[in-house]
Amino acid sequence: MKGYNFAYLDEQTKRMIRRALLKAVAIPGHQVPFGSREMPLPYGWGTGGIQVTASVLGPDDTLKVIDQGADDTTNAVSIRHFFARTAGVRTTTHTANATVIQTRHRIPEEKLAENQIIVYQVPQPEPLYRLEPSRVETKRMHALSDYGLMHVKLYEDVARLGQISISYDYPVMVNGRYLMSPSPIPAFDNPKMHRMPALQLFGAGREKRIYAIPPWTDVRSLDFEDHPFRPINAHQACGLCGALDTYKDEVITDDRGGRMFICSDTDHCEKRRSPEADKAA
Amino acid sequence: MAYVAVKGGERAIRNAHAWLAEERRGDPAVAELGLDQIREQLGRAIDRVMAEGSLYDPDLAALAIKQAQGDLIEAAFLLRAYRTTLPRFAHARPIDTASMRAARRISAIFKDLPGGQTLGPTYDYTHRLLDFELAENQPPPDAARARPDLSPIPRVPDILGREGLLEADGPVDAEPGDLTREPLSFPAGRDVRLQALARGDEGFLLAMGYSTQRGYGGSHPFAGEVRMGEVSVEIEPPELGFAIDIGDLTVTECQMVNQFKGSKTQLPQFTRGYGLVFGYSERKAMSMALVDRAMRAAELGEDITAPAQNPEFVLYHSDNIEATGFVEHLKLPHYVDFQSELQNVRRLREAVEQREAAE
């Protein structure tokens, strides 16, 4: 785009972000502060993810952007359009064809590969913030691996409700050291993070933090031996493709209680419905 | 030099206000702003002033904005001061937002739902790049038009409420309170709290709502629904015995759906936060819904740890007319009090100095 550098940010800013990314990769799950910039999209709408994507994107990359698992949700359309406009990169809706995938709230159903990077938009990087709002305190807790507060919260859930009641943004331990927010993905997606072949990068623009999970890193959802981690999902099959093993959206079809469940990952669902058409694309 | 007492306040005020009027007009070579231009082209400012001024009148709001040189709190103050002179001739029936002629209706919790998702005229998904063509007064592109669908749009709480997944509205057992007639007292009912928030400062509510999202009194909010559009205002004169339509209002309504765990006597159920604001003011309606829910902490048996959960803190500080008056009153003369403080500090210092000298 005329008057703007490739992928909007200037090269010095990108270099600063890449330095933060390298540090983040070197200390898996650790939140690295960075000089987050004002972006032409509002805070909370993916500014962190956009800055990370802008910093790793090259002219030969193919970008996929999803929100709620879908390529056609308004915010995904907006961000994809932003990069098509400012970087002129190829974009795709097909998970397998993308080299960089920016996501909000989902991990694609299709397994990611070593040559791919997934960039998560993160509203709140601090996994402990609901238990301890002060960032001065939580920083100390991370330094000391002092995660008792989170274990107590999970224990209290079990004591009161008979089960752990977190359904999204379910905290994980990364590489056995740092407690990390997986971003508000459904807990259903957590197991996909474990030893994922792709590089996972996390950007929180408003909170000015970057963190990362290098490929093949251990990522364990917090649980107890007698109350193992259980992902939550609708038990109905997808009303379009019949899949049982994918995450579903609930769609209200009338005001008399009518509803159907459909795959939230639209690319995966379409591919299951017409595998041939997908190959041609 | 002989002492000259400071006098002539009257002339000073007269001159200052004449200067203000001149400054308000700006360069006389530039065309003067018409109220119609403000009303038509600064709609969000009109909406904010009507909401915080508690008076739905776009023309008067335009005048107030012009008179206040675009200082929106000053403009809201002008409206409030005018509003207070108006006689109250009837009470309207509660507006029915389900039958709103909605220009915008979105839900963040269902991908699709009865009534559909309608973006309407929104800044969402615009890229915040300064549009230099706008500086050149280019006419806007034609917007596509759909045939208006006037069928009522069910509210998301009614959809979730059907399964019992969302708490119902509490019973209406009394006339709602009115802060413009009765002073605030505590514990304040939800009716009065909501009235205070609807009149409250957008920036204050935004910061309070935001604080709940960062761990200071959070409640897992989801924007169940935001809708904006026109609703009818009806009154029911006792001599007629039936309702008559007296005009339309544009309002923005937000239904926030929040998590709640349930208890021994109650199945797990979502709780609600509610926002309703004059005009098109989504930021404020959403903030209001967050703060409304936060202030229900005591009622729902939650720990009260954060400012947004403290109704006394929120309600005593949300009104920007009260706040700006008191903050700015510090400009008024305080010679007398300051003089006694001055003498006091001198006396304390002297006492210490004498003690030190004696040692």
Image (cartoon, coloured by chain):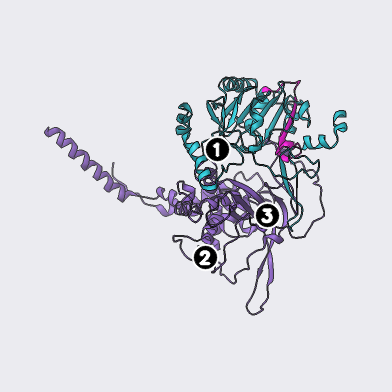
Chain colours: A cyan, B purple
Quadrant of the rendering where the N terminus of chain B is positioned: top left
Q: Residue furthest bottom?
A: B239
Give the secondary structure at mark 1: loop
Give the secondary structure at mark 2: loop
The residue indicated by pointer 1 is: A226
- From this view, report whether residue A271 is shown above or below residue A175: below
Residue B200: where, in percent of width, then height?
53, 53
Report the span colored magenta.
A56-79
Residue A42: where, in percent of width, then height?
63, 37
Local crowd size for mark 3, using a 10 Å CA cut-off: few (<14), some (14–19), many (≥20): many
Picture residue at 57% right of the left edge, 59% below the top: B54
Picture residue at 79% right of the left edge, 41% below the top: A242
The residue indicated by pointer 3 is: B156
> What amino acid is at disc 3?
Val
Q: Is residue A76 magenta?
A: yes
Q: Is residue A203 left or right of residue B98?
A: left
Q: Nearer the viewer, mark 3 or mark 1?
A: 1
Q: Nearer the viewer, mark 2 or mark 3?
A: 3
Q: Chain of mark 1?
A: A
Q: Is residue B236 magenta?
A: no
Which label number is shown at residue B177? 2
Labels 3 & 1 near each other (Cβ < 8 A): no
Sequence-earlier tag: 2 or 3: 3
Residue B356: where, in percent of width, then height?
16, 33
Local crowd size for mark 1, using a 10 Å CA cut-off: few (<14), some (14–19), many (≥20): few
Cα separation, mark 1 vs mark 2, equals 52 Å
Quadrant of the rendering where the C terminus of chain B is positioned: top left
